[in-house]
Image (cartoon, rainbow, N blue to C red):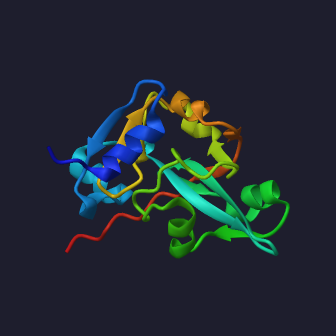
Amino acid sequence: MTTDPDRDALEASLAGRSDYELFACDPALADTAAFCAAYGFAPDDSANTIVVVGKGMPPAFAACVVLATHRLDVNRAVKAKFGRKASFAAPEETRELTGHDLGGVTVFGLPAGLPIWVDATVMTRERIVLGGGSRSWKVIAPPSILLTIPGVEVVEGLANPAPPRPEAAPE
């Protein structure tokens, strides 16, 4: 019997939480737009976990959960939460802090004490698709599953709707 260490770690971090479904995906299709297009999920049901850093010494980190149709407001909302300048964490910082590669970052099983801020619009969805800790897995669950994480905070205005993307010109 073959085991999947990524799935095992994900299931361990989800143990005792509300109903959820694990969804296997091609790692090459893990990025949100490609995943939604390939597997038929709506981008407004896709919730991304984004690591941010408060500048200064020592740096402070937090994980933010926002809908794929929204943009994290780092310059105002995140800066206000940290009380200092903030930016997106570099991919290497995200990997070092979470153990996850971009495209697979999950909010489950993060280090104890790491602030987790969820944009309030995430909580309005019937279900959300979250990263699964690797580029091979996603978690499908009601957004209330996020409230099972100790210390999670729902924040109004953490993200804003993204401007519409221009249509590609026909060739």
Foreground pick, 21 / 45? 21
Quarter of the rendering occupied by the N terminus: top left
Q: Is residue 57 left or right of residue 72?
A: right
Residue 40 % position (x, y): 25, 43
Compared to 55, does 107 lie above or below?
A: above
Compared to 95, does 40 lie above or below?
A: above
Q: Residue at x 73, y 58 (%)?
A: 78
Q: Residue at x 49, y 52 (%)?
A: 48
Foreground pick, 4 / 42? 4
Q: Hey, which quadrant is residue 144 in on the image?
A: top right
Compared to 21, does 5 lie above or below?
A: below
Residue 61 % position (x, y): 69, 62
Q: Residue at x 50, y 67 (%)?
A: 95
In the rendered image, the residue lying farthest to the front is 1
Q: Is residue 156 left or right of residue 70?
A: right
Foreground pick, 38 / 9? 9
Q: Is residue 73 left or right of residue 107?
A: right
Residue 30 % position (x, y): 32, 58
In the rendered image, the residue lying farthest to the left is 1
Q: Is residue 142 visible?
A: yes
Residue 116 % position (x, y): 65, 47
Quarter of the rendering occupied by the C terminus: bottom left
Q: How many marks?
A: 0
Foreground pick, 55 / 100? 100
Q: Is residue 69 visible?
A: no
Q: Residue at x 34, y 52 (%)?
A: 6
Compared to 144, does 171 lie above or below?
A: below
